[in-house]
Image (cartoon, rainbow, N blue to C red):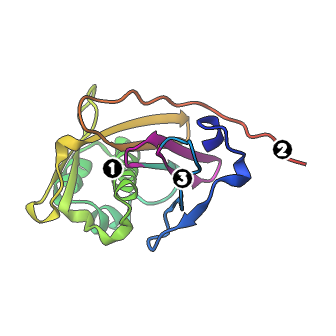
Amino acid sequence: MLSTFADVKPADWPLAIDDHGRPHLASRPSGTPDLRFNLSHTPGLVACAVTVGREVGVDVEHIGRQLVHDNIPERFFSAREVAALRARPDAEQRVVFFDYWTLKESYIKARGLGLALPLGQFSFICAPGHAPTIEFAPELHDDPASWQFAQFWPTAEHRMAVAVRRTGSDLRIDVSEVVPEVVK
């Protein structure tokens, strides 16, 4: 995927894994842009987000997973998110759950800190017809205005969220379906 953006053979990208399990470029091949990427996978789908010079995170989930019940939201969401989720009709809670889940995962992956970030100290505000926004508890030390979030339905069974650190106005986020070639 990175070779789409630079004239480098796929095998020549120097990949490494950081202390939190996040893949990244160990070094930038000569003459290439400052590409940053993030990966996510779930049964039936793999997602890759790529930016130039900006932190990025992506999460994709199959909505058939059984995560809505068993107090999972109470364990991993902020009190505000739990209240918003539980206020929805039962028939809507599965989709709303995955809205929050993928947004939270995309943000912590973009930050590169994984579960070292306390999930209860940031909340997503999701309003129909508007892009999701984020708010932080004072001890988290991040700027909500520096983040852009987008959500997608890549298939009828998959929910995807992307988080991008921005320095100004919103960036255009394009989603493309790619079917990889089979290398023999």
Q: Which residue is mark 3?
A: 28
Q: Residue at horizontal 27%, vertical 64%? A: 119
Mark 3 crowd level (few <14, some 14–19, many ≥20, 10 Å Cα): few
Image position, residue 111 (x, y; %): 34, 58
Q: CA separation, marks 2 and 3?
A: 26 Å
Residue for point 39% across, 51% down: 106
Q: CA distance from mark 1 to mark 3?
A: 33 Å
What span is colored magenta in the figure? 34-56
Viewer-nearest residue: 47 or 64 = 47
In the image, residue 117 sits, relative to residue 170, either above or below, namely below
Q: Mark 2 or mark 3, which is nearer to you?
A: 3
| Residue drawn 45% across the image and 74% down it | 19
Whether residue 63 is situated above or below residue 177 in the rendered picture? below
Question: Which mark is on residue 100?
Answer: 1
184 w.r.t. 120: above or below: above
Percent position of residue 31, x then y: 56, 42
